[in-house]
Amino acid sequence: MSHSTAENIVLVSSPFDSIDRPHIALSLLKGALQQAGHLSEIAYANLHFANVIGPANYRLIAERYPTSLLLGDAIFSQAAFGRPVDWENLLDSALFDVDELGHQHRSSLLAHLPLLADAAVNWVSDFTASAHWDNVELVGFSNTFNLLPSIAIARNLRQKWPLTKIVFGGGLCDGPQAATIGEVFPEIDFLCQGEGEVLLPRLVSALRAGELEYSSLAGLVWRSDSGALITNQGRAQESDLGKQVTPDYDDWGSIRPTLINDGGREVAYPIESSRGCWFGQKSHCTFCGLNGAGLKSRSKSGTQVLSEILSLRDKGAKRLFCVDNIMPHEFFEDLLPLLHKEQPTPQLFYEIKSNLTYDQCKALRNARVLAIQPGIESLSTPILKLMRKGTTAFQNVRLLRYAAELGISVNWNFLYGFPTENPREYQLQSALIPLIRHLQPPVGPPSRVRIDRFSPLFFSASTLGVSNIEPAPAYKKIYPVRPDQIASLAMFFKFSGDYVGEPDEYIQPVRVQVLSWLKSFGSMVCVALEYSDHIEIYDNRFSEGDQIRLDGSSASVFKQCRHGITHAALEAFRLESGLAEEDLQSIVESLIARGLVTSLDGRLLSLPLQRSADDFETIPRSLRLLLFVTQTKAAMTTLMQQQDEFLLGAKVLGAKEPA
């Protein structure tokens, strides 16, 4: 770490923040401080620690293992509390929510975690002993999932540089957690609840003015002269996104190559275009613990976002990772068309709803939104209703097909274990999966739902069939504090539910199908080439490869199913075309029996990826279908590469990880 004497505010990115993208929250805080006349710098402690233990080991903890296992906190527990961890006891507790695939990692974890913990103790001591910390006035930490790495650094700083003020913020410092963190860790002088872009500059101004009383700063938790912890009412004032400066990542770009040698891996720079969740304001997904009390949705204008994207493009960014909880719907009308006109622009990742039309998916593709996380979660409409997703199985499957046709990578999780769910829904999903193995699979095997603090499953537990909520068992193995303090600190919880049967048993047929899907994806192809008078299909989902030709009425009915057609609309088509009722029934039954069409939520949806023969007009007719197949296999490989480039791939454990 290095800083000039003028930049005596340091914002710390602690382990296990990602080492593959800069810290957008700290970068925005740095910009807000600068706007208020306060210079600061970001200390990427995470990069320094990754340099010590190696990027591969670091990424296993930061990106591959579920955050709910608390392995990041466990590694820094000894550095924070000065006592060793009972690793066998911890893992027996931490793996409570991981399936049999996760338990296979137990012996490897037992061998390596103690070594990483020893490295953490030595590294924290060295990192905080540097003379560069001399004259630092204030150190800020932003914490989303891991708390103890920041605590270990803060405690060492307080011991070695006692005059330095320490501020904590981020997702872990919200609601009752903030006061409890302040109670348990007296080294922390201030905690910010809510957004920090307004609160932190005001706090710095007050400190520099010599003020000793901060009760006017809404959202602040602070200590009086006597050491008493005071919690101000309300949350921090929201920042004006319209006045937000484009994040400056030059500090990260200059230091990362000196610490992380990964062969020039192309990174995805984070960008923010909105906050909150416009859908969550209407219907908060039951398992979603994002935002705490900040679900209120607001966004930047399309022109402002475009300006930020072009600014980052001009600095060399080729991929941008949008950190929004959900893409604003109005962007289909302003931002995406603007991006289409400005090509080439960086590739983009967005979280989005799955109820998209083909034209909306095409608009995403034209704007180079090449990776999305649409919150699919399930292929069962009744279970999606339990989740309050506001989507259907039909919409989810249709989106998977649209995305595959357009070359958009889909990042999605398969969740199960929602109280009151009907086990029969998993039998139906098990029957559906073989039909869609040519579409992009979830990132891993099915994950049993967990409870996060700010989710409806936590705060509306009794109405959702949830009981016996208690902190994840690993907390008490890592945090040597009172049970009531653990209950307030914890972000992740175990629970009992109102179930008909045992979820881990009735999920097994689906688990087998998903694992097969993950293994075979890229080799399974089902495509349909559309001519004016017939359709040629190649399908190897159930054989080494069948070629099917649909003519006449069969081809016409198949075309009607492209976007999903209701039975009433299909009947209207039958009457208009003069097709006999029994002939239509026979055609539909044949298409379903061949797996070319499926019936979901009262609609018939065709499943093959579809293109017009006109796209291959320069290719000899006999080679067109073969070329389509070859291109499709290559495209599926590209989809998985895009997913890895944006998200570093799937976690290796089948844990109860939320979407």
Image (tube, rainbow, N blue to C red):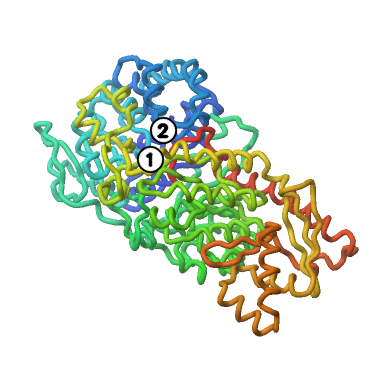
Quadrant for residue 600, please give it: bottom right
Q: Mark 1 points at which residue?
A: 450
Amino acid on which the number 1 mark rests in the picture: Arg
User: Residue drawn at (21%, 28%), measured in percent from left and top?
Assistant: 483
**Who comes first in sequence, dot 1 or dot 2?**
2
Amino acid on which the number 2 mark rests in the picture: Asp
Above or below residue 230? Residue 568 is: below
Residue 251 visible (yes or no):
no
Quadrant, the N terminus = top left
Q: Mark 2 points at which residue?
A: 97
Q: Nearer the viewer, residue 403 or 145?
A: 403
User: Residue drawn at (61%, 32%), measured in percent from left and top?
Assistant: 262
Are dots 1 and 2 in contact, CB under 8 Å? Answer: yes
Q: Is mark 1 on a helix, strand or loop?
A: loop
Q: In this view, does 361 lie to the left or right of 134?
A: right
State the residue lying farthest toward the left: 226
In whole angstroms, how far apart are the C-alphas of marks 1 and 2?
8 Å
Quadrant for residue 209, please give it: top left
Q: Is mark 2 on a helix, strand or loop?
A: helix
State the residue lying farthest toward the front: 582
- What is the number of the mark on residue 521? none
How many other residues sit within 10 Å of disc 1, few (<14), some (14-19) or many (≥20)? many
Instruction: Provide residue 162's location: percent of width, then percent of height.
Output: 24, 25
Instruction: Provide residue 133's location: percent of width, then percent of height.
Output: 35, 28
Residue 112 visible (yes or no):
yes
